[in-house]
Every structure is written in C-alpha cells, then in structure tokens.
Amino acid sequence: MSLPKPSGLPRLSEVKLTRRTLVAGGAALAVAGAGVAVGVTHCSRGAADVPVEPSAGAEGSEDSAAKLGGKLSLYTSCPEELVNNTVARFSQGTGVTVAVVRGSEAELAGQLADGDALGKPVADVVWGGEALWYAGVEGLSTGLEPVQREVGAFALAEGLVTSKKEAPAAYADLLVASLAGRVALCNPASCEVGWLHLVAMLSEAAGVSAGGAPGDDVSWAFVQELLAAGAVICADEDAALQALLDGNADVALVSEQCARQLARRTGQTTVTWPESAMGVVDACAGAVEGCLNERQATAFVEFLGGRDGQQIVADALARPIADDVQVAGGDDVPANDDVEVVATDADAAAKQREEILATWAQVLAGEWTPAAAEEDAAEDEGEAGEAKA
C-alpha cells in the first residue's frame, strides 16, 4: 500500500529530521539560521516556513484593525507539517503572533507542571496528546477538547518493500528473524504514539477478542521478546523516523499522519496499518487556565475545532474530528468507520496506565518476570519453609 511518489523530492538519505523550538523574536530567529526573515522561523523537515507574525499584506481584504492581534504561546507535540500549516493560517487570519514550543507529550506535561508549581503558566495553549498526559497539570486536563484522531501505523523503509522480505501486517510479524533489531519503537513513557502502539500490541498478543486482557503474561512475553531481539527504543516519533531514514531500522511504529507525511515527502517509504489491533486515541487542545493571553488562546482552540482548522488537519494527512471533513488520501487509507472497530480496549488500558508503564520499565530493564513464575516461586519457597519446619 505505497503512496504516490511526488516529484522533485530529496532522496531518502538526504532527508534529516531535527527537533527545534520555534519562538518569535529577533534573538531566537538569529539562532534559527541566517537568511530567515524577521517574524518568520524556518521549520525543519523541509516543510514550509512558519509565520509566527502575520505576513505583510496577508488577508488584505480584511480590516486589519478588526483582527484580534496580540501574542500566543503554543505548546504542541503535533508533527511539524501540521503545526506549520495551522499556525500560518491562524496567524494570517487573526494577526496573532504565535510562539511555538514543540516536544513530546511527557516533555510538555513536565514543563507545564513546573510552570504551574511556580504560579506562572508557561503556555497559553496545549495541543496534542490525549488528556491523560496532562492530568497532573491543574486547570488544564478538564478543559481539553478533542481536535484530531491519532491512529497507529507502520512506516516501512524502501529496502524492506523492495527486498524479498515480507512486510509486517500485524504486530506478531515484527518477531520474524529478518526484522530482529530493525524495529523502531517510541517510548510509551514519554510519547503518545509509543503508548498507542504498546497498548495495541499488548491487546493483540493477549487475544482481547478471545477474552484476554492487556498486560497479562502472554502479552508482556511478546514485548519482552521484541525488545530482546534488539528493538530500537526512541524518545519520540522524530527519533523513530530518523532511525528509519538513517538505515538503522526497517519498520518504525509511529502515527498514521507522520508515516503518511514521510511517504509523501520522500516517495521512498510505505505506510501499512496493523490488521488485527489498530490503536486509536483522540488528540486534544485546550487553553491553560490563568494564561497570559486568554482571548488568543480561546480563539486558537476554536479555530482548530472549526471547519477551516479541521480542513488543515485533513490536508496535513491527520484525521479530523469533524464528521463533515474527509480524511485525505487514496483508497489504501482506512475509512474512519473501519478505524473505529479496533481490538484495543483503550478505556481499560487507561485505567491500567500506571501498572502498564511500570511493567514496561521492568521489561525494558530486563527485570520482568511472568506473574505465573512469581507465584510458582512463592509456592516453592513456602513448601521449602514448611519442610524445614
């Protein structure tokens, strides 16, 4: 299921992904690189420039005095292409100067919590990740609204597709010998997409449809085997995709939108969707209570949830929440109705979140033991004690 190959794009080996904090202001722009115009920060990944201040003459037919104006501090974990397009359109239409800080969900939640502890909100708006990530941030988690859907997918390197190796169609296929050490995973403790894929693979391995439950011995034994085979653990999607681009992985477990964006940008990667357990969550946006720019924050969240914002989401190959906005793509992209029927029990996983992440840490450290084995060991110790007595 490969996506069409665009013309005039760099070769896979020439594409480099970087993480960068995008801010408005002369000093920050100087750091971003020479040749960048004032009020515009160049974004990485080869995407379009992001006007963090409204472009001169933008929306010329509109009375500039009627524009909202002011500033906005946006914290987001969304892919840069989506952020770029959204910020540019919002800035041009409202006259709001937008400063963007991009990081993983765990990074953003930590910075927000630190700012909240000091009584000084560090952001006006948070965008990306489900509400669970921000549960510890006072005045935020209850105000988050779904604005797009995150779907787990496999990004496949060109070499895997063109070789005689069989491309994985399900999580179980990741254990084939030819993929040992060639699978890139996002850390579920720091990244939404990592959590999404972990819950899906646990559900598939446990056979949820047959009465199993995420987090049983069988499912964790699968994860243990995958890590033991040398899976590449990445902090976030950027790192996972970079592992793919650098030739250090053949498969990257990332979000559907990032996988599709990379395929469109390079023309040399392929996207597939897990057949038996597709992870899905709602990514949210919300204004931070007590923020410095409340009017601008409210306007941005409303823009994201409105028709124009949802269309930008779709055009960037993400999935909009709005029913009247279609998912962009060809016949190979699963329809929303198909995505909704998944094996993953997201609600049950959310309730087990701390337990699942604690077990993940044990497996990652090589310290995990099946519960059944622990029970057997405890029984043996008890019997040995009785024998001595």
Image (tube, rainbow, N blue to C red):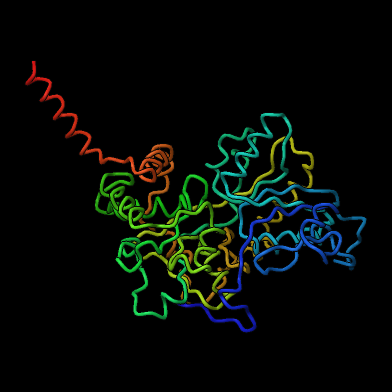
Residue 125, position as x, y percentages in the image: 70, 46
Residue 57, position as x, y percentages in the image: 90, 67
From the image, which quarter does the N terminus lie in?
bottom left
Task: State whether residue 333 is above or below residue 162.
Answer: above
**Image quarter for residue 384?**
top left
Residue 143, position as x, y percentages in the image: 63, 40
Residue placed farthest to the bottom in the image?
A: 7
Total number of numbered discs in the rendering: 0
Left or right of 278 on screen, residue 32: right
Residue at 61% in and 56% down: 78
Left or right of 128 on screen, residue 99: right
Task: State whether residue 313 is above or below residue 191.
Answer: below
Q: Nearer the viewer, residue 263 or 92?
A: 263
Residue placed farthest to the left in the image?
A: 387
Residue at 39% in and 39% down: 352
Q: Nearer the viewer, residue 306 or 187?
A: 187
From the image, which quarter does the C terminus lie in?
top left
Residue at 65% in and 34% down: 114
Residue placed farthest to the top in the image?
A: 389
Residue at 40% in and 38% down: 358
Q: Nearer the viewer, residue 66 or 313?
A: 313
**Image quarter for residue 236?**
bottom right
Residue 341, position as x, y percentages in the image: 39, 59
Task: State whether residue 18 is above or below residue 109.
Answer: below
Left or right of 63 on screen, residue 47: left
Left or right of 54 on screen, residue 233: left
